[in-house]
DNA sequence: AGAAAGCGTCGAAACGCTTCGACTAGCGGG
DNA sequence: CCCGCTAGTCGAAGCGTTTCGACGCTTTCT
């Protein structure tokens, strides 16, 4: 019992119910329930006795019964994309931060994959399996959004659809991030900069964050009077190398690179190394990526705050579950960390 | 209604219950239940009427009530590691294949992260939130294993602990995979080969798959009379480069490389390129990694069949849930695909 | 012809919890 | 001195399913 848990003998076998706890503590079943939920005042003495019985019997409330009676499953759904062009480690960090944050609110996380499509959402919601949903990687024109609007269960999007009416979204302010990179390079005295973005397919699909970065980048270019452009960028070394060498050949004046592609950024660096360009002397590189990609490569970067986004999404969902109003859009402000590449 | 779903007007609002379906179809509640579960014979006519009512009312059984009455949540837990040294994309493929397979058996997946530790497992199991567990990335001496043995809920491990008594495991046969790589290189006439493995921390932790590959590799070396050794390998480009150039300097006769490290394999290739070694002319490379890493790099490889492992794990769990006996260890036989690197 | 064995259906009893209303003390205010 | 509070507790009514036993009907076997 050193780990604070009951003698583990009864881990196996029929589960302990609230009735047994009540009997053991010499109180009514409802009293046990109130002790555990804190929804009514309970004398210190009774509370103590009940909690002790709970501990010694190793009681865990039955999730199904609880859900049935309270109409709350204490579970939220996390809908992951799992599609081409998404950087998986980043995804994973969102996922784990959602799980952690949810546990903080005493909720669990049900994993839904996007390939079950609308039916999956409908099913999870209609069967009261989950109380609410968090969706990742929302596209500009996402078929799930109209469905979400109709669902009784509240939901929070990570990313924004084109028509965000009636939904709640949270994300890094990618437009500001793109602009911030440009501003940084302008300040460093660069005159010609290029954005190396996500694979072409991501733009075609209309994934919001890629487009918004692009818009922010382009607007900032004009604002600072810089020359430059944006290119999509595939993720294999060979493709990256081809893109980079083509780019350097075509733009001899190029002195700054903004890379918004976690998977390609290391290849870009290898490629420059191979082409004999020194970073940051010959070329400054700024990345938009998570810290654990930027850090080891000593890249100046705007980090993608996966943890924060996930936490925020869960926080918003909990607010909605509690019936409180929440802002329709939450944009996290980007922060740039200067490292060795600019 | 073109998508085969009821008029979506009532997606919002109070959920339809089995009582309403029964009334609508003019039968008893239990009859509806039996139609849906198929556990008793029902006349074709009644079945049709009930199914139609289900469809037009848009009925979805309440998960909580169902779990309470049937003592089955129809949910399994997936316990993910999320720890240093694991290659995340591979993890993700396991995860999605588990989800997909589970859906095939009409089960959902609850995501637990390892950092909730033993308590998380205990809680999920004891509260009947889940019917069974799938655990990934089991270490040789894993504290969760004793707990699992005691749990009433069945579980399946992906990977094997040192003491596998009383648990069910499934994995690629990594020893055979290591041996297969050696055999392939021997057959190609190589006499000196080296295994570049996982980061050192992975070995220290005693993660089974890394060790087993090593054992298979070493045994096969002896069996084929080859010269060689094994080295752990970190994942950053610089470290890989240092390891590789050191290795080439130390072993002028080296002509074959086995790489068992998804994250490093591309760096190894870059590094060789940078050192002016041609693959496969100067050096043959065989990787143990998922196809989507090997394919684009045109690497000869033994693939890590993430999909298959996940599917198998869920299949085994379902067997156990049905009370049927399953083999304690399921080893998937490795297959080597020859591509351009050997 | 009568018993045995299905088939198809129904009613009602769980399942384990939350929550509502009611009840008892004890207490302060008029 | 009585009234109305509040704090603390209890009992019982759900919550929406599944499943067990029972009940008529047919059919099949002696």
Image (spheres, coloured by chain):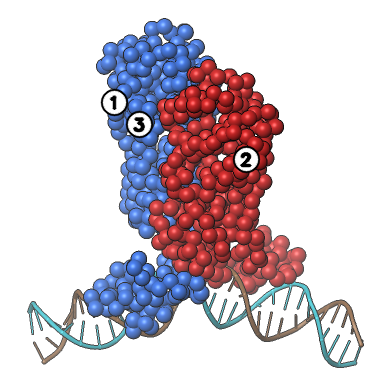
Chain colours: A blue, B red, C cyan, D brown
**Residue A157 falls left or right of residue A49:** right
Q: Position of residue B278 (x, y in %)?
A: 58, 19
Q: Secondary structure at mark 3?
A: helix
Foreground: D5 or B330?
B330
How far is mark 3 from mark 1, CA to CA? 11 Å
Foreground: A221 or B339?
B339
For residue A338, which numbered disc appears in the image? 1
Asked whether disc 2 touches disc 1, contact meaning CB atoms under 8 Å apart, the reply is no
Q: How many marks?
A: 3
Q: Are marks 2 and 3 on the same chain?
A: no
Q: Secondary structure at mark 2?
A: helix
Residue placed at 65% from the left, 60% from the top? B327
Q: Position of residue A154 (x, y in %)?
A: 42, 50
> Mark 1: few, some, or many residues within 10 Å (few <14, many ≥20)?
some
Q: Please give the residue where the numbered disc 2 appears in the rendered image.
A: B222
Foreground: A181 or B196?
B196
Q: Position of residue A234 (x, y in %)?
A: 52, 24
Q: Are marks 3 and 1 on the same chain?
A: yes
Rendered position, B93 above or below A227: below
């Amino acid at each position: 019992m050193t780990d604070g848990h009951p003698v583990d003998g009864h881990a196996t076998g029929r589960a302990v119910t609230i009735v047994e706890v009540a009997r053991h503590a010499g109180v009514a079943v409802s009293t046990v329930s109130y002790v555990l939920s804190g929804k009514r005042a309970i004398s210190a003495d009774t509370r103590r006795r009940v909690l002790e019985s709970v501990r010694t019997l190793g009681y865990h409330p039955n999730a199904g019964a609880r859900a049935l009676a309270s109409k709350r499953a204490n579970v939220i759904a996390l809908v992951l994309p799992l599609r081409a062009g998404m950087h998986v480690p980043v995804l994973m960090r969102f996922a784990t931060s959602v799980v952690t944050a949810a546990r903080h609110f005493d909720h669990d996380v049900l994993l839904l994959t996007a390939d079950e499509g609308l039916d999956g959402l409908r099913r999870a919601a209609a069967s009261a399996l989950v109380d609410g949903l968090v969706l990742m990687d929302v596209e500009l024109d996402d078929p799930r959004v109209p469905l979400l609007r109709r669902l009784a269960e509240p939901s929070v999007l990570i990313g924004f659809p084109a028509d965000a009416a009636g939904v709640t979204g949270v994300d890094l302010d990618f437009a500001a991030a793109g602009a911030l990179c440009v501003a940084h390079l302008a300040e460093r005295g660069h005159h010609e900069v290029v954005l190396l973005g996500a694979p072409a397919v991501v733009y075609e699909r209309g994934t919001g964050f890629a487009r918004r970065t692009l818009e922010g980048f382009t607007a900032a270019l004009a604002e600072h009077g810089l020359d430059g452009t944006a290119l999509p960028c595939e993720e294999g070394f060979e493709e990256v190398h081809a893109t980079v060498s083509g780019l350097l050949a075509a733009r001899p004046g190029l002195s700054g690179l903004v890379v918004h592609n976690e998977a390609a950024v290391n290849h870009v660096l290898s490629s420059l190394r191979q082409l004999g360009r020194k970073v940051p002397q010959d070329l400054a590189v700024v990345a938009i990526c998570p810290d654990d990609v930027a850090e080891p490569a000593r890249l100046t970067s705007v980090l993608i705050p996966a943890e924060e986004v996930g936490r925020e999404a869960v926080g918003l969902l909990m607010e909605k579950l509690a019936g409180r109003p929440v802002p329709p859009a939450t944009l996290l402000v980007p922060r740039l960390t200067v490292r060795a590449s600019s």
